[in-house]
Amino acid sequence: MKNRLMEQEFVLFDLEVSNKEEAIRALIDAMDCDGRIGAISGYYDDVLKREAQASTAVGMMVATPHAKSKHVNVPSLGFARFKRAIQWDESEEVKMIFLIAVPEAEDGNQHLEIISSLFRKMVYDDFRDALSKAQKPIEIVELLKEN
C-alpha cells in the first residue's frame, strides 16, 4: 500500500458538478484506493455532517471539506478543480476543493495540521495561480510537497 498523503489519482481537473455534495462524492470515489477509505458512504456522511456544522469555504474560491472518520484507514488528501465554479454555501462560490480524510483513531490533530499547511500556502497568489494552471496531477502533488 502506498502511504503518501496525496497520490496523483486523488487529483481531478475540470470536474463537472452542480453542487458540493456531488463534488465531495466524486473526490471520495477518486481517493478510494489501496484500502484508504473503508466505507465510502460512511465517510461521505461524516464529511457532510462536518460541513453542516460550519461551511468549509475559506474564500479565494477554495473549500477544504474534511472529517476525522472511523471509515478512513489512511490519512489522505484529494484535490479537485471544477470546470465551472459552484455555489458552496449561501455566500461563497468555489472553484477548487481540498478533501482531507483522517482516521478517527489518529492521535493529535493531523487534519488541522494539514489545513493549516494549506492555508499558509493559499495566501500566496503564485500558489493559487499554480493550482489554477496545472495541467497534470503530478504538478499538484509536487506543488503541495513544497514548503
Image: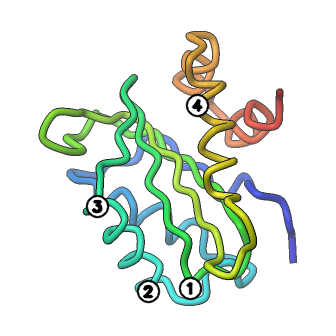
- Cα separation between marks 4 and 3: 20 Å
Q: Secondary structure at mark 4?
A: helix
Q: Which residue is mark 2?
A: 42
Marks 4 and 1 close (CB-CB < 8 Å): no
Residue type pointed to by label 4:
Phe
- Which quadrant of the view contains residue 120? top right
Q: Residues within 10 Å of mark 2 (few under 14, many from 20)?
A: some
Q: Which residue is at the far left?
A: 90
Instruction: Tell me the residue that label 3 is attached to.
Output: 53
Q: Which residue is mark 4?
A: 119
* Badge 2 vs badge 3, beta-carbon distance below 8 Å: no
- Sequence-wise, the earlier of marks 4 and 2 is 2
What is the three-letter code of the residue carrying label 1?
A: His
The circle on residue 71 is 1
Closer to the chain start, of discs 2 and 1, is 2
Mark toward the start of the polypeptide (2 vs 3): 2
